[in-house]
């Protein structure tokens, strides 16, 4: 866990901290790639802090079923992102033509 996450976790109310730690555990035991996991955890922590700041319930944002939320996060992290894939292909094509020109 990053230093930033450890520091920000201290700002969470007890009930929100429990929810965040459950999410951390469920995602941590999944097969999400490590860097992706770190990004997701930072994003979720940011969302929880924002919801807390607005005095809203986490249920209104994450839904009633925390397990389902975690499963959806895990599934969406596995799917290759089409936009990123297309950008990577375009980058490789441009790099190839730059090599040919040089």
Image (cartoon, rainbow, N blue to C red):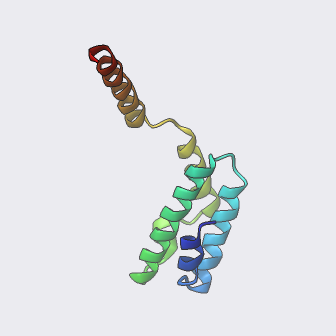
Quarter of the view holding residue 94? top left
Residue at screen point 37% across, 36% down: 83
Residue at screen point 55% across, 45% down: 77
Quadrant containing the N terminus in the rendered view:
bottom right
Q: Nearer the viewer, residue 72 or 91?
A: 91
Give the vertical position of 16 relative to 74 (above or below). below
Residue at screen point 42% across, 31% down: 85
Give the vertical position of 84 relative to 31 (above or below). above
Give the vertical position of 19 relative to 71 (above or below). below
Residue at screen point 35% across, 29% down: 91
Q: Position of residue 19 (x, y in %)?
A: 62, 72
Which residue is at the far left? 101
Quadrant containing the C terminus in the rendered view:
top left
Q: Nearer the viewer, residue 89 or 20?
A: 89
Which residue is at the far right? 29
Which residue is at the far front? 102
Give the vertical position of 87 relative to 64 (above or below). above
Q: Position of residue 79 (x, y in %)?
A: 53, 37
Quarter of the view holding residue 84? top left
Q: Nearer the viewer, residue 52 or 60?
A: 52
Residue 94 in the figure: left or right of residue 65:
left
Quarter of the view holding residue 96? top left
Q: Position of residue 75 (x, y in %)?
A: 58, 44
Residue 20 in the figure: left or right of residue 98:
right
Q: Position of residue 10 (x, y in %)?
A: 58, 83
Total number of numbered labels?
0
């Amino acid at each position: 866990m990053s230093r930033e996450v450890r520091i920000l976790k201290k700002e969470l109310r007890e009930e929100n901290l429990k929810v965040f730690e459950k999410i951390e555990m469920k995602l941590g035991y999944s097969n999400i790639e490590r860097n992706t996991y770190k990004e997701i955890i930072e994003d979720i922590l940011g969302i929880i802090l924002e919801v807390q700041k607005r005095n809203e319930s986490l249920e209104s944002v994450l839904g009633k079923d925390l397990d389902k939320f975690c499963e959806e996060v895990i599934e969406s992290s596995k799917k290759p992102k089409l936009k990123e894939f297309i950008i990577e292909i375009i980058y490789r094509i441009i790099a190839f033509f730059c090599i040919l020109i040089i």
